Amino acid sequence: MRMTSVVSGRRCGVADTSGVVLLALFFCFAGLVVWAGLCRGGVRLATEGWMRRELARLQSPPNTKQFCFAVIADNKTGGRCREKVFVECLRRIQSDPEIAFVVHIGDAVCAVDPQLYNRFHKTVKTHLRKPFLVAPGNHDVGLFTVDLYERFFGLRYYAFRYGNAGFVLTDGSYPWAFDAQQLRWLKETLKRLSKQRFIFVFQHQPFIDPRGGGKHHCLPESLAEKLAAIYRGNKVSCVFCSHVHGYFEGVWGGVRYYVTGGAGAALAGKDPAHFFYHYLKVRVSKNGSSVKVVKVAPLGKQSDGLNWFSRNKFEIAAAGWFVGWAGLLITAIVFVLLLRKKRTQDRANTPPP
């Protein structure tokens, strides 16, 4: 009888301890959900569905066979960048009467944060009155905050016709962004644009890292080959990429590409032939298309950017939201299982009448 009493007491103590631990975990996860909810709920966006309105602003060119557009990328508002360079790019584009619209290929901000989105939007609207189309970069989307990007910008990938050309803006933020759904959309879109004289594709990450030397700031080789085959098979004129902060051009997999990442973010090297601030001016005519590199001086002082937590606070909150709810669910399930186990043990230890 004494042995039974001691064992029973130990079991009771273990059960009580488990209950306390589970209760503590429950409140921790609940607190995480509340904090994440406050962060997410406190979002104040300057605009929503921005790209849909920019698309609506596009007007047919006076001459459908001759027009110009600008390509720009990697200003990284809030990060290690020269914001005055980005402003100067916008001013020059605005003052150039030949340029009809602008395509930005990603990394508009240094991290997913509503305040940085708003700051970027304000800069663009202050210095540019021409249509401004954006394709996402890895710093714009994040891992857990795609919903915020879609809410603010409206579209992750989309296409449009302008003059005698087709424009395809993809979500090249991460390799996994090119999932089955986007690849299917890409093939169907390119097929639909097949009658256009030119087809221009925009994706943030390039096929290869043009710097060489074992650097891999680019798509995985298997995905790059798959995309190149799709572009080649649909007679894409050229692909504009960014991600690497500099300027490069070449042909890979039978596809002409340009890497342009010079709108203000810290440059990725010191070779003056490739690493300088710039944007591209693309001229389309009945005879073909040409790309002009417009260099911009390194204006202003390079900022140090936000600290790690400030850059990733919203991403952490988004992850915390999922972790918190998952933790609450798991804790509740474990608590119920322990409660059932304890009741079973109590019935087994209860002496018969």
Image (tube, rainbow, N blue to C red):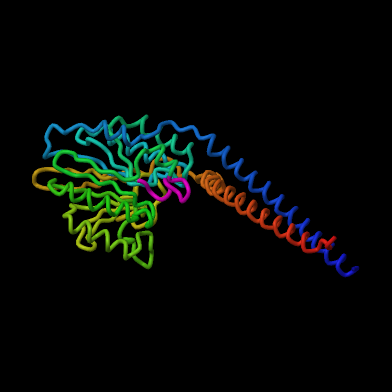
Is 332 above or below relative to 207? Answer: above
Residue ID at (31%, 56%):
206
The x and y percentages for residue 307 are 55, 47
Q: How many marks?
A: 0
- The image quadrant that residue 347 belongs to is bottom right
Instruction: State left or right for residue 286 relative to residue 156.
Output: left
The x and y percentages for residue 146 are 43, 46
Q: Between residues 223 and 86, which one lies in front from this camera angle?
A: 223
Residue ID at (26%, 53%):
258
The answer to whether residue 44 is visible is yes
The x and y percentages for residue 280 are 26, 45
Residue ID at (32%, 43%):
104
The answer to whether residue 307 is visible is no
Residue at the front extreme of this rendering: 353
Indicate the quadrant containing the N terminus: top left, top right, bottom left or bottom right. Answer: bottom right
Q: Check if residue 263 falls in the magenta segment.
A: no
Residue at the left extreme of this rendering: 287
Residue at the right extreme of this rendering: 2
Please report the bounds of the magenta region as a residue range: 136-146
The x and y percentages for residue 49 are 37, 35
Q: Between residues 50 and 329, which one lies in front from this camera angle?
A: 329
Q: Between residues 304 and 326, which one lies in front from this camera angle?
A: 326
Instruction: State left or right for residue 65 relative to residue 281.
Output: left
Indicate the quadrant containing the C terminus: top left, top right, bottom left or bottom right. Answer: bottom right
- The image quadrant that residue 134 belongs to is top left
Instruction: State left or right for residue 182 relative to residue 163.
Output: right
Instruction: State left or right for residue 332 relative to residue 1.
Output: left
Q: Between residues 221 and 191, which one lies in front from this camera angle?
A: 191
